[in-house]
Image: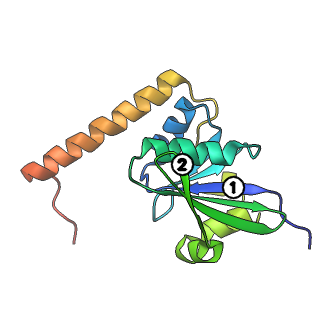
Amino acid sequence: MADPSPAAVVLTQVAVPEALAAACALAKLPVDAVPTPIGCLAWCRDLDGGPAAVARAVSGLLPGVPVLLLEQRDGQISASRWTGGADSAAMSPGLVLDGAPAVVERLLLGEAAVGDLPGVVTSEGMSRWRATRTLAAISRATRRSARDGARGTGSPPSA
């Protein structure tokens, strides 16, 4: 069996794929933001220096929140943690994949295509204007939800 094509993903705690795609669009980084149960991942479209740039940019935008970069080249997976825009530590890819959603490994090994996954949002072709408006709308919705929750006017939990 031939080695899969090189691939890279950045695992984040960003909950909304539109927000991750918009932030990457503003940084001019070509990614597909994929929602997962633990946060969105950024599927790196540019593998020539792109994965590190995506990890640097996303970790720089999320101060104090680490992101994980997983790269697969020649059938070998490497993992690193990025914090505050810098590569902070190499990690065991086996341990990272053990705690990650199965889709991460499937994407890295070429067993799944990002275009076939539900909820994917791309940064490519997103204008600065649209990216800024997207982030502003998400920010307003988040503030409104927090304000309503603090007032107790949010919707009651469903049974």
Pointer 1: residues within 10 angstroms few (<14), some, or many (20+)? many
Q: What is the distance, in whole Å, between disc 2 and disc 1 at their CAs?
A: 17 Å
Pointer 2: residues within 10 angstroms few (<14), some, or many (20+)? some
Q: Which is nearer the eye, 9 or 33? A: 9
Residue type at mark 1?
A: Ala
Whether residue 138 is visible, yes or no, is yes
Mark positioned earlier in the residue sequence (2 or 1)? 1
Residue at 61% across, 31% down = 28
Residue at 57% across, 71% down = 96
Q: Is residue 58 above or below residue 92?
A: above
**x, y percent for residue 141:** 28, 40
**Tag 2 and tag 1, C-beta contact below 8 Å:** no
**x, y percent for residue 6:** 79, 56
In the picture as drawn, the residue positioned furthest to the right comes out as: 1
**x, y percent for residue 15:** 41, 53
Say the numbered circle drawn on residue 8: 1
Q: Which is nearer the eye, 99 or 36? A: 99
Residue type at mark 2?
A: Ala
- In terms of secondary structure, where does tag 1 sit? strand
**x, y percent for residue 53:** 62, 42
Whether residue 112 is visible, yes or no, is no
Q: Quadrant of the C terminus?
A: bottom left
Q: Quadrant of the N terminus?
A: bottom right
Q: Is residue 22 above or below residue 55?
A: above
Say the numbered circle drawn on residue 86: 2
Asked whether, in this view, residue 13 is left or right of residue 138, the answer is right
- In terms of secondary structure, where does tag 2 sit? strand
Q: Quadrant of residue 127?
A: top right
In front: label 2 or label 1: 2
Asked whether, in this view, residue 15 is left or right of residue 142, the answer is right
